[in-house]
Image: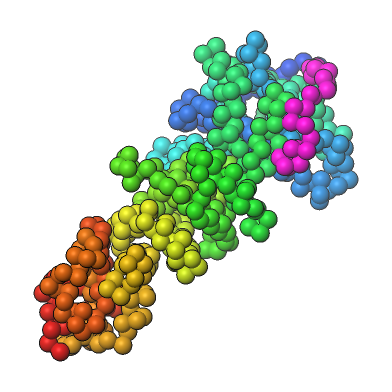
Amino acid sequence: KPEDAKKENTTEPEPAKPAEVIKGSLKKHEFQAETRKLLDIVANSLYSEKEVFVREVISNASDALEKLRYLQATNAETYAGSKGQPLQIRIDLDEAANTFTVQDTGVGMTEAELIKNLGTIAHSGSKTFVAESSKSGVSKDNIIGQFGVGFYSTFMVGKTVTVYSRSAAENAKGYVWISDGSGAYELAEADNVAIGTKIVVQLKAEEAKYASKTVIEDIIRKYSNFVGFSIFLNNELVNTLQPVWTMDPKSVTAEMHTEFYRFIADTYDEPTFTLQYRTDSPLNIRSVFYFPQTHMEKFGMGRMEPGVSLYSRKVLIQPKSKQLLPEWLRFVRGVVDSEDLPLNLSREILQNNLLINKLKSVLTTRILRFLQEQVKKDATKYDAFFNDFGNFLREGVCTDPQNKGDIAKLLRFESSKTEDGKKIGLEEYVARNASETAASSTEAGAADAAKDTKAPIYYLCVPSRELAKQSPYFESFQKRDIEVLFLYEPLDDIVMQNLQEFAGRRVVSIESSKADDSKED
Ligand SMILES: Nc1nc(Cl)c2cnn(Cc3ccc(Br)cc3F)c2n1
């Protein structure tokens, strides 16, 4: 695990091993037509950014390590031979030779798997794959990862790819697989092949940047920073941050959250609030959300980008996704990881959208409940947060009808009965004006009558308390000791018009005709 590797010194010089040697002669194999079509798509048109080949080979390596760890635990005797090796991923770059090499000490491949792994996958998925990948709404980059055909993305940047692999099963032989990504590959037995898989990409001349350490380091940090195995780049440990969202919340310290928050939010402040949320139903979710201390929109510095990234099994799928939370929650930073989001082609894209929408509504509800808990926990701290972020919540009342009732509970106002500067919420207002019944009940249907029999929530839009006191409208309410909310924020008028009612009570401005009812008592 990366945290274990931290104890090992991070620049571990790898003892030189004898180079692999081909045994016998290379045998040529033609790809089946199916496979070739699929692999052409992968190597040429599928990915929006070529850099994702790094993510794909690291994900395959991570899966191979995961698989070996499982087999060592369940078939100890068969896999005893591999016990000596640390489970890790090494990437070595050679600018002179213009090569990118990734090696894992994972379960490795037998000769049959080297042949099968590309063929069958292509065979099983290629029709749906080709059909869906053209219309898929979800970013295509992630679909390949599911097939493990991600390996073939190396041909986006490689003119020749050589794979050395030896299965971790006892007495397995080592093999070498070579291809230029066209219709064929060569295969032979080889000596000095370490258990696991080593992929040597001879880079195209125009892709030499992928032999640069800084380029590859940035790509690893972007996509694969939380892979559960140590990743060494030119013998230096790269992935040191822990995937806090997958850890037991009790074992994550505030410092770990702050470090992680600063990494994902690319900022230096600390989160005001932290929510770590995990559930297995209605779908698997491991998530963490941070509420920043400050934001730029209040200075009119333009609209903030959403800040929650979508991962699947610790691998970045969609950075700063726009689909995970409603727009008015764009100030929230964090990570959502769900194993249930296969993004693969067997499900209708529509279903994926249903999955994403289900995820969005579960997350939004949980965040609203969390913020309501913060109001009760520390109203002063919450009010400070509300002073800075209140406009996002006001926007939510106006743009998210499904959640507007719950968002309204988070709004805070001064009133004719609060001390100057002190705020209350709508629930508090309702609770202490519950005894009131409205003066007149109309002949309208039962529902309306219910609404009318409960005293409305009265408010006054006014720049300050002093001006409220001078308002002729307010005078009559003051005389009858009826509490009136003071809305100092211009936006609040629109918010209240959008809200219309709360907890079964109409929300009424004392400057409007509707408030006249109260004069009849
Ligand atoms: N690292 C790693 N380890 C394992 Cl166990 C597997 C199994 N499949 N793949 C993908 C793949 C498939 C065919 C060829 Br040729 C190369 C290749 F990387 C793997 N990659």
Main SS, magenta region, reads loop
- Provide the residue span drawn in magenta: 1-22
Q: Quadrant of the C terminus?
A: bottom left
Viewer-nearest residue: 498 or 177: 498
On the image, the x and y values in percent for residue 355 come to: 46, 55
Q: Left or right: where does residue 461 sit relative to residue 143?
A: left
Residue occupying the point 32% across, 84% down:
434
Q: Nearer the viewer, residue 14 or 373?
A: 373
Is residue 180 visible in the rendered structure shown here? no
Q: Is residue 407 above or below residue 473?
A: above
Give coordinates of residue 246: x percent, y percent. Answer: 63, 52
Quarter of the image where ligand 1 sits: top right
Q: Residue at x 56, y 36 (%)?
A: 223
Whether 394 is drawn above or below 88: the answer is below
Q: Position of residue 492 (x, y in %)?
A: 25, 61
Q: Residue at x 64, y 41 (%)?
A: 241
| Residue shown at 59% from the left, 19% from the top | 212
Quarter where residue 384 is shown: bottom left
The answer to whether 357 is drawn above or below residue 452 in the figure is above
Name the spot of residue 240 as percent of width and height, x first: 66, 38
Q: Quadrant of the N terminus?
A: top right
Q: Is residue 188 visible?
A: yes
Q: Is 16 covered by the magenta stretch?
A: yes
Total numbered badges shown on the rendered structure: 0
> Does the magenta-highlighted stretch encompass residue 9?
yes
Q: Is residue 129 left or right of residue 230?
A: left
The residue lying toward the viewer, choosing from 489 and 221, is 489
Asked if residue 124 lies left or right of residue 480, the reply is: right
Of residues 224 and 69, the one drawn nearer to the viewer in this rendering: 224
Colouring mode (rainbow / by chain / secondary structure / one colour): rainbow
